[in-house]
Image: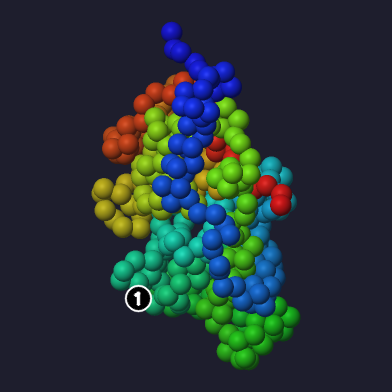
Amino acid sequence: MRLIISLAMIACVSGSQTLADIYSDTLKKSVIRFGYKNPNEYELKIDMELAEIGQKLFESENLSFNSNMSCQTCHLDEFSSTDGLPNAIGVGGSGQGIARLNSSGAIVPRNVLPLWGRGLPEFDTFFWDGKVQDTAKGVISQFLNEAPSEDPLVVAAHLPIVEIREMVIDNPEFDQLYKKEQVEAGYGLFNEIITREQFNPDFISLATHFDTDVSDLNSKHIGEALAEHIKNKFKLRKTKLNQFIDGKIEFDEYEIQGGILFYGKGRCVKCHNGPVFSDLDFHSIPFPQLGFGKNGFGVDYGRYNVTDKASDIYKFRTPPLIEVAKTGPYGHSGSLTSLNDAIIAHFDPLALINLQNYDALQRVTLFHNLQNANNKIQIPYLDELEVMQIKKFLETLSFIED
């Protein structure tokens, strides 16, 4: 029989300090120890004029090659900067949420990541597979030695615009002109969009800001504007956790116990640490695969697609947890609809899988995924109550009104 201690019923154990106080103080110290920062600690330098231009570009379908897809299409306020879908629906889609899922748009085989905190100086690794990463040797990306900027956020802002299915339809015209394994082809697509939009007021404003002619705009100008908007709109905001750390509120029993589990038995903090609750490193967690996957046939090799290293197969970048309660579905393919299931997948993944519905390829892929799972963390069994308590703690990472 497991002993459950109610914090509200604990007697004093040290002078006027209760065990509840000790747990609360311990949690605060743990949060701070593992990289927590109050949003007010950051003094981000933002060019507001450029950010406003970037917002217009972010919202404009004219920024896509086929003029029917914007950045905002997949990063909606209603879903806290995601789209609410397991796999994103790119070019050719219509509507949002379930309506977009039922449209005839192209499926993008990964779940949309939220954008919170992308402008922080510590945020140096982008996308599920880390295909843009700031390193001691410079920014590593698909642009190879021809990256448009030394700022990884600016480089990352380039890629959706040239991604097939995401913001570019795969048709004979595109294939002939731009579907080539050459960096020049990507820049050529940007130049095509700029030439086409030379009379667009947003592009004219962009050229004016950089004191140049529209004909002299290039991809870097667009990337810098988008990055400035992202840095501004999606900067970190006040959460319930912030107020708890600042001593303005107290957590309830479940939130305290969930936090203690997060930093203790649950070992969540091993990967989910720092100001956005991510180590921005890569780990293999055997989440179920949904959809055809980045590699096709229901397979997604994750980080391996970027590095070609066998040790990176099935690894994905640790997702930040800011606003996590509002940004489901979860996992690289959006296969888990509830936060409870996302927690369970870390220590009991087989509980979420019906093997009777798996074909041979799916079973083999799952077996390989389990073999490659990161065993260094070794998360122990968590019962239903403990999973619920961790979920309650994660809910304190949601933004609150000032």
Residue 173 in view in this figure? no
Q: Nearer the viewer, residue 215 or 129?
A: 129
Taking 66 as reference, is 263 above or below it? above
Q: Position of residue 287 (x, y in %)?
A: 44, 36
Residue at position x 71%, y 49% from top?
401
Left or right, 381 with respect to 15, comes to: left
Residue at position x 55%, y 45% from top?
245
Q: Nearer the viewer, residue 97 or 244?
A: 244
Q: How is the image coloured?
A: rainbow
Left or right, 402 with respect to 326, comes to: right
Local secondary structure at mark 1: helix
Q: Position of residue 18 (x, y in %)?
A: 52, 26
Q: Position of residue 183 (x, y in %)?
A: 42, 74
Taking 190 as reference, is 32 above or below it? above
Residue at position x 36%, y 26% from top?
380
Residue at the left extreme?
Answer: 310
Taking 399 as reference, is 46 above or below it? below
Residue 234 in view in this figure? yes
Q: Position of residue 33 (x, y in %)?
A: 41, 47
Taking 392 as reference, is 36 above or below it? below
Left or right, 201 with respect to 311, comes to: right
Kind of residue at badge 1: Asn
Residue designated by label 1 = 145
Q: Which quadrant of the figure contains the N terminus?
A: top left
